[in-house]
Image (spheres, rainbow, N blue to C red):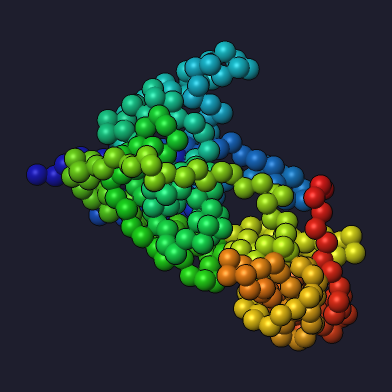
Amino acid sequence: MNLSPLRVIFAGTPEFAAVSLQHLIDHQAALNIEIVAVYTQPDRKSGRGQKLTASPVKQVAMAHGIAVEQPVSFSLRYAPDDGISGKVSRETLAAYQPDVMIVAAYGLILPLGVLNTPTYGCLNIHGSLLPRWRGAAPIHRAILAGDQETGITIMQMAQGLDTGDMLYRVSCPIDETDTTQTLHDKLAALGAEAIAEVLKNLHAYQDKAVPQQEDQANYAEKVHTKEGQINWHDNAYHIARQIRALNAYTYLNGERIKIISALPIKHDQTTTVCAGQVVSVGKNAILVSCGTSADNVQHLINLTTLQWPGGKPLTAEQIAHGNKINDGDIFEIKIDE
């Protein structure tokens, strides 16, 4: 007996979500699903021309002729219009008669009335091994914390922030060279495979859902720009994680310099060089002194790629030839910007 395809609504906005959407579109027949609509954030202005740009998810949906909805809110208390737009958004959603809604980095709060609209509720593709990192920036926080692994959790959405029961978890190691971008790409691909796995046998996964352990939960707060400023009194390993996880930067002679890549180096010799001072500039390494680690050892960090305002990224060799940095220079730490 052929069962009718599961009616799926997909809700997401950035590239992380677009990877899952494309995967589900490519495997609709095998998964016995039909993506009846895609929900995404309204078009935003971007680029130098500030032109309205469709989200990556919308671009995928349009390329495959799938209906796209871009509500500004689902709230019945939305201030500008007393919830009228939220009411219309809910009615439109219900009209699609969804069996399940797949959510990945959508960006809109889904009230309980929306979560309960699909027959089998809403499933979230979350970029961490819940409950380790709940919230907006689980990939950044995992790298900053020095976690050795992260992963994807497919979660049955509930009213709380990433508090729902877990249907499926799959892990991913965090390599010492992983940046937010490389780890994002790994998890995006893993998330696409994970949601497809769950949809193969949704009822079985929902029947075996596992509640999260609240005492293991951490909040992955949204990343703020100032978190990227390097404090050279920190140890080199912390600074290296900061560079891998964030848009890291420092100051030299009043100029803000972006640090794109670096490697920590253990330095066992006693030194009186102050934190943030350039120890040596060479074609393979720009060595900078950092603070001491927990073992009371001072470390150096090798800055391998830097970028000055308005310029292109430069390697250590290019910087050495250009005399942009010299031995003895001291990177500044600005408390207030």
Quadrant in the rendering for residue 254? bottom right
**Residue nearest the observer in this picture, 240 or 86:** 240
- The correct choice, above or below, for 41 with respect to 325 in the image is above
Q: Is residue 68 visible?
A: no
- The correct choice, above or below, for 295 with respect to 109 in the image is below
Residue 121: image x %, image y %? 31, 33
Q: Is residue 151 visible?
A: yes
Q: Residue at x 90, y 64 (%)?
A: 253
**Residue nearest the observer in this picture, 325 or 94:** 325
Quadrant in the rendering for residue 100? top left
**Residue nearest the observer in this picture, 104 or 30:** 104
Q: Residue at x 71, y 80 (%)?
A: 270
**Left or right placement of residue 237 versus residue 289 in this view:** left
Quadrant in the rendering for residue 10? top left
Quadrant where the image shows the N terminus: top left
Q: Residue at the far right: name it.
A: 253
Q: Residue at x 34, y 26 (%)?
A: 117
**Left or right placement of residue 148 versus residue 222 in this view:** left
**Left or right placement of residue 303 versus residue 87 in this view:** right
Residue 156: image x %, image y %? 32, 38
Residue 227: image x %, image y %? 68, 51
Residue 135: image x %, image y %? 50, 42
Q: Residue at the far top: name it.
A: 82
